[in-house]
Image: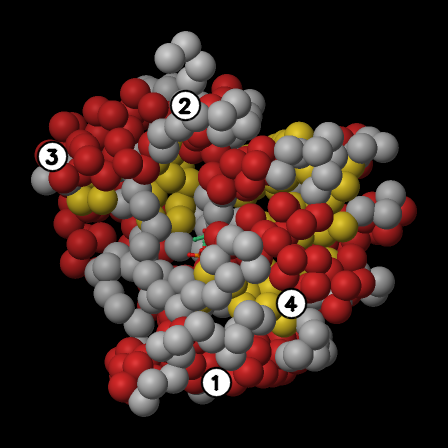
Amino acid sequence: MTRPLLNRRLAEFGTTIFAEMSALAARTGSINLGQGFPDTDGPEEIREAAVRALRDGRGNQYPPGPGVPELRSAIADHQRERYGLAYDPDTEVLVTAGATEAIAAALLALVEPGDEVIALEPYYDSYAACIAMAGGTRVPVTLRPHEGAYVLDLDELRAAVTDRTRLILLNTPHNPTGTVLTRAELTAVAELAAERDLLVVTDEVYEHLVFDGAEHLPIASLPGMRERTVTIGSSGKTFSFTGWKVGWITASPELTSAVRSAKQFLTYVSSGPFQYAIAEALRLPAAYFDGLRADLSAKRDLLSEGLAQAGFEVYRPAGTYFVTTDIRPLGATDGFDFCRSLPERAGVVAIPNAVFYDHREAGAPFVRFAFCKKTEVLEEAVSRLKRLA
Ligand SMILES: *Cc1c(COP(=O)(O)O)cnc(C)c1O
């Protein structure tokens, strides 16, 4: 057979660095701070709620296409109580198989072949693949390090818009840089979207993981944006049940219906009993969300300080559970080489940020570590990383 098996839309996405790095971690007995999943399960009462739903026969058969009503109203209440955003649970909320399916369904529904999609670079790996599957062209706008944080260059964003631009794909709090877009930045994005008649798809799966009093602001809450924005949320990161794959979108009835048209032919439905459990999770008292933030904020400090002591330049994240570092102070320039040798040198696995870039050279000297791990695991990682200094 001369023709490659994998079609040309997906050819560039054949293998991911995560598989390589996780295999390396297992082979070398390294601490895996590469992939971002918690090593502790979420609240016991929510796990029990899933068991109860399963035993009571709720969700064991196909749940309703848009999601179970209990979860849709919990999502609507969450958006209203936190952000003052009112969504009708029947026509403006759609439950998905994690944020991953929401991203795929939104792009498949809204992008026409040839449309350009602007995404903030470095970007979450599924964005590029989903834009490609939709036949779109991705146009990266690069977040650049400036005085210890990554910032969005609004002129660069404005210059990236063409007559073919269909939508802007946002992610705040931002993985992998930990940046939380400010009200000023989001206002500028909103003005641009209105002026050029663009849609906005915004991935807000880390909405609850913001530190030091930083504020997460959904762009849908800015004037005029509700009608042109698809907001994506997920329970995975907020409740530490990433295997349950309960995500959602909130958007106008027209946008929700468009996304549902694609979603119904992807998974149709998913996660039946877990949907009931997440409906309860979204109604946990403020103490839960505060506790999660305090825990991760302490872990961020522990890992950030350890990395700085080991010689890295550290971009202290304002949100998410990732920290990006610059390896140049350690005498290295290529993140791939660095991450491939780190297990041998220090018994720790990390991810080279270059995999999140089209402009690979812009990401070359940066490396990402996850801190959603037990304190003792992070302490051990920090003590191993001291070998580098
Ligand atoms: C983890 C993650 C997702 C995927 O969320 P799921 O609900 O697990 O599908 C989407 N976007 C970003 C930025 C993420 O980090």
Q: Crowding near pointer 2: few (<14 within 10 Å), some, many (20+)?
A: few
* Lower position in the chain sequence, tag 2 or tag 3: 2
User: Could you say where residue 192 lies in the image, as x and y percent from the top left?
Assistant: 83, 46
The local secondary structure at tag 3 comes to: helix
At horizontal 44% and vertical 72% (from top left) the residue drawn is 62
Location of mark 3 (residue): 27
Mark 4 element type: strand
- Identified by mark 1, the residue type is Arg
Task: Give whichever of discs 2 and 1 has the lower sequence position.
Answer: 2
Q: Is residue 56 above or below residue 28?
A: below
> Looking at this rendering, what residue extends furthest in the right direction?
195
- Work out which quarter of the rendered image holds the C terminus and state it: top left
Q: Is residue 128 left or right of residue 237?
A: right
Amino acid type at circle 3 is Arg
The residue that disc 2 covers is: 5
Per the model, the C-alpha gap separating discs 4 and 3 is: 42 Å
Whether the residues at callouts 2 and 1 have beta carbons within 8 Å, the answer is: no
For the residues bearing labels 1 and 4, Cβ distance under 8 angstroms:
no
Identify the element where label 1 is drawn: loop
**Mark 1 lies within 8 Å of ligand 1 (Cβ measured):** no
Label 4: few (<14), some or many (≥20) within 10 Å?
many
Q: Which residue is mark 1?
A: 283
Residue picked out by circle 4: 250
> Which one is earlier in the sequence, the residue at label 1 or at label 4?
4
